[in-house]
Amino acid sequence: MINQPKVVWSEGMFLQPQHFQQHERYIQAQLVQALRALQVDAWGFTALKIDKGQLALGSIVLTECAGVLPDGSFFVLGDDELALLRYTVMEGERDQPVVLALALQRGHGVDTETAPSADSLVRYRVVEACVPDSNVQGSEAATLQLGQLNLKLAREQDVVVSHVFLTVARVLERSPGGQVLLDEEFIAPVMAWRRSPKLAEFVDDIIGRVRQRAFTLAANLGVQGLGGVSEVQDFLMLQTLNRAQPLLVQLASREGLHPEQLYRSLVTLAGDLAIFVEENKRPKQYPIYRHDQLADCFTPVIQDLRHALSAEAGSDVVPLALSDRELGVRFASVPDSQLYRSARFVLAVRAQLPDDELRKRFPHNLKIGPIECMRDLVDLQLPGLKVHVLPAAPRELPYYAGFSYFELESEHPLWAGLSSSAGFGLHLAGDFPGLQLAFWAIKAGQ
């Protein structure tokens, strides 16, 4: 930033516009330096919304925009200013960052124009406004000339030398029909992480996974007969997650928190979990934080956290594919009859119902047994195999958000007939909108 000395005010001096202009520059420079001293990368959007309807017409238009430019210029754009911002994507444009740009500060020269052209390098547009006297009641408003920031939307490559800017979006292409396709993975620089829908989605998802994984580990810890990861390893992971969860919840409650502080905490958690998921037991080399490249920083960390927090199905888990048969019966083939003797059979169920209602209704509405017996079970309303709800997903299974888990009970006369059966038949009565089912056999621990 250009050095801006203060004005020396003295009695009897001849006041000129330059005195007040320099005084404004000095005050602004002091504010910017103080802001930078308090927070590194103290710039970015505090509000940003793109008009989705205008994208279909080939243009990028903003409906909400506020923030701080990298040079410390604050902006909160009203409807009149937003109406002046439009970038029309030309046919053939691909992989182009579109930015909100303001001309760089210059040491000398005119900085305002009444009607600046698209190529003008002035920083302010002169507008007239009626301003009342706030000290005298009933006084007439005076018409003043005010300066609005001369912001514009442009391609980054067109302004990278002459302007300071914030990247609004990344254009992937313009379709033959004229619709603009944006990179959905792009994350605009923001002053607070909650201002980015993508970062908010990341954090909420990770907190949910931490809670679910910790709950599963706590529920299964000390239970006999569960194969998979050793109990000591589960205990250590639970300890790690119990430490991380309160911290993440606190971070999530701080909507004004800078993204760099969030990134630091997520990288720390990824490093703590590396011992459980990486072959060499060491953390990966994650990108150094770049405020102008948030997607490149956060995406690999979030992917690794999702992987670490999902219980990967190993060789002791056999997925049982469900196929539709006649009369609403589903069939699951069991590849090895030995599984009936030692494995646990678990159903994962999801429907557009409250969790409590699903867990209550599903066991009563389900008929399950050997596929050869399904016609009698359904037509004669005979009881099939019983299932009971599990408090959490078994540690051997992947984490699926929104699913409830049920285990088959082997204490039933029908179970003996499974050894010579082709597999399970399932029939579900009643209305379960948006029903999704998954079925596994979990081998007993060796």
Image (cartoon, grey):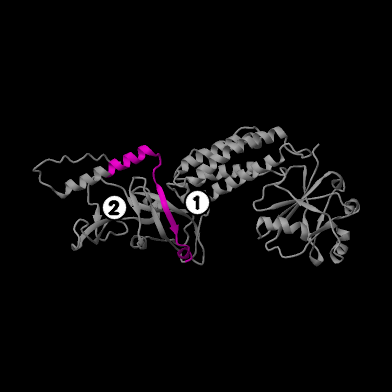
Q: Which residue is mark 2?
A: 123
| Residue 246 vs residue 114, the one in the foreground | 246
Looking at the rendered structure, the kind of residue marked 1 is: Phe
> Disc 2 and disc 1: Cα gap in Å?
28 Å
| Residue 100 vs residue 15, the one in the foreground | 15
| The quarter of the displayed image where residue 360 is located | bottom right
Looking at the rendered structure, the kind of residue marked 2 is: Arg
- For the point 40% across and 39% down, the residue is 40
| The quarter of the displayed image where residue 369 is located | bottom right
Q: Position of residue 113 (x, y in %)?
A: 24, 57
- For the point 68% across and 55% down, the residue is 356
Q: Position of residue 139 (x, y in %)?
A: 18, 62
Range covered by the magenta-colored residues = 28-56
Name the outermost residue toward the left. 12
Whichever of callouts 2 and 1 sits on the residue coming sooner in the sequence is 2
In the picture, measured across the screen, residue 388 lies left or right of residue 418, that is left
Using the image, determine if residue 364 lies above or below residue 189. below
- For the point 39% across and 45% down, the residue is 43
Checking the image for residue 186, the label placed there is: 1
Please report contact status of discs 2 and 1: CB closer than 8 Å, yes or no: no
Checking the image for residue 68, the label placed there is: none
Q: Residues within 10 Å of mark 1 (few under 14, many from 20)?
A: some
Magenta region includes residue 47 = yes
Q: Position of residue 265 (x, y in %)?
A: 52, 38
